[in-house]
Amino acid sequence: MEKPDMRILIVDDEEAMGRLLKSIVSGKGIPARAFTSPVKALESLKKERYDLAFVDIRMDEMNGLEFLEKLMRLR
């Protein structure tokens, strides 16, 4: 089976959840990067390309909807 040509971004302020999601997708051969800080994830988006994002909606630093709005402005 051919590996998918994609990268996944995971943003969740609960480190354990980010590790779990990363483990699941990495186990399928899909590169993933997990962040507990939405601000750091946005900084990463300025340098790296991702094809799919899993984003927690309830985070303290910035909620998931705010994160997605900022992500769209980067594009």
Image: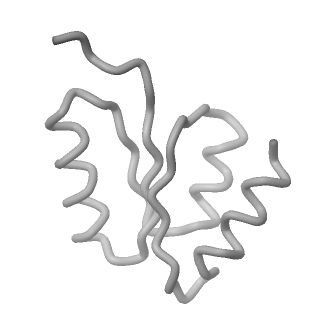
Judge from the rendering whether residue 61 lies leftward or rightward of residue 28; answer left or right: right
| Residue 40 spot, x, y in % from top left | 59, 59
Where, by quadrant of the figure, is residue 13 drawn?
Answer: bottom left
Q: Which colour scheme is used?
A: one colour
Where, by quadrant of the figure, is residue 28 drawn?
Answer: top left
| Residue 52 spot, x, y in % from top left | 50, 43
| Residue 70 spot, x, y in % from top left | 77, 62
Which residue: 18% across, 48% down? 24
Number of marks in the rendered image? 0
Observer-nearest of 1 and 45:
1
Image quadrant containing the N terminus? top left
| Residue 68 spot, x, y in % from top left | 68, 64
- Relative height, residue 69 to residue 42 (above, below): below
Where, by quadrant of the figure, is residue 14 drawn?
Answer: bottom left
Residue extending farthest to the right is 73
Which residue: 39% across, 54% down? 34
- Relative height, residue 14 to residue 69 (above, below): below
Which residue: 34% across, 21% down? 4
Judge from the rendering whether residue 38 lies leftward or rightward of residue 18; answer left or right: right
- Relative height, residue 14 to residue 28 (above, below): below
- Relative height, residue 31 to residue 21 (above, below): above
Which residue: 50% across, 51% down? 53
Residue extending farthest to the front is 1
Judge from the rendering whether residue 16 lies leftward or rightward of residue 41; answer left or right: left
Image quadrant containing the C terminus? top right
Judge from the rendering whether residue 8 lies leftward or rightward of residue 4; answer left or right: right
